[in-house]
Amino acid sequence: MARRGSYAKGVAKRDEILESALEVIAREGYRGASVKELADAVGLSQAGLLHYFDSKDELFTAILRKRDEVDSRRFGEVDADPTPERLREGYVGVVRHNAEVPGLVQLFSRLAVEAGDPAHPAHDYFVERSAALRAMFARTFEAQQQRGELPHSVDADTLARLVQAVSDGLQLQWLQDPTVDMAAAVDALFALLGQDASATASEEVGPAGIEPTTSTV
């Protein structure tokens, strides 16, 4: 019974550390969020903080997982097969919120690059997160194609990868130039993907069935 109580306290303390870390990094930025500052925020020594994590990289990976959990609570858990409207609203909401927490975006972007190494503690997190996000997009886009709301010229999996690539690219642009409106750009992309297939077809064929000319400029 004592062991079970001790384990529960350990889990609670770990969760407290992650919640506090989100606040510190959002406020101080990735560079300002040293292990010492994170430890001070929860009343622990640096060694005491790392007692709950295998390494600094494992700590930062856990912080990103906690961020995803918090975002799901804040913007609503997205269904496995969300409607286009629900997917757009939830995803754009997250992107808009990201602009308010630059430190967490910095952490995500830096760790994403380092996690290209399969041995990095965050590698599995990024691979699994990316695959799950693309799968959710792809299912929604495929359903839209079946209903005639999207053309079949590009398969749903590729569309999902393109949306993800645009989002990742916008984050890098925003980190370099904070005037970039990530949410507006992502919302505009969803608006394009929401075009009716028949409207798209009419634009491709042109009036009276005449093929449009192709500019070589």
Image (cartoon, grey):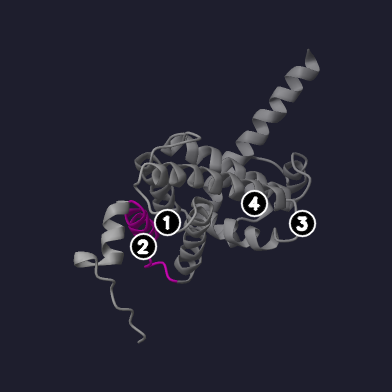
User: Which marked residue is nearer to the observer: mark 1 or mark 2?
Assistant: 2
Mark 4, residue position: 126
Provide the secondary structure element on which disc 4 rests.
helix
Query: Between marks 4 and 3, how big is the CA–CA gap?
Result: 10 Å
C-alpha separation, residue under disc 3 versus residue under disc 1: 29 Å
Identity of the residue furthest to the bottom in this view: 217
Query: Would residue 114 be found to the left or right of residue 18 on screen?
Result: right
In the image shown, does 84 or 30 lie closer to the viewer? Answer: 84
In-front residue for pair 132/176:
132
Residue 141 percent location from the top left of the image? 44, 47
Residue located beneath label 3 in the image: 118
| Location of mark 2 (residue) | 181
Q: Are marks 1 and 2 in contact (CB under 8 Å)?
A: yes
Q: Which residue is mark 1?
A: 99
Q: Is residue 123 visible?
A: yes
Q: Position of residue 167 (x, y in %)?
A: 47, 59
Disc nearer the start of the sequence (3/2):
3
Vertical relation: 215 (above or below) 86: below
Say what secondary structure mark 2 lies in: loop
Q: Is residue 168 magenta?
A: no
- Label located before the other in sequence (1 or 4): 1
The residue tagged with tag 1: helix, strand or loop? loop
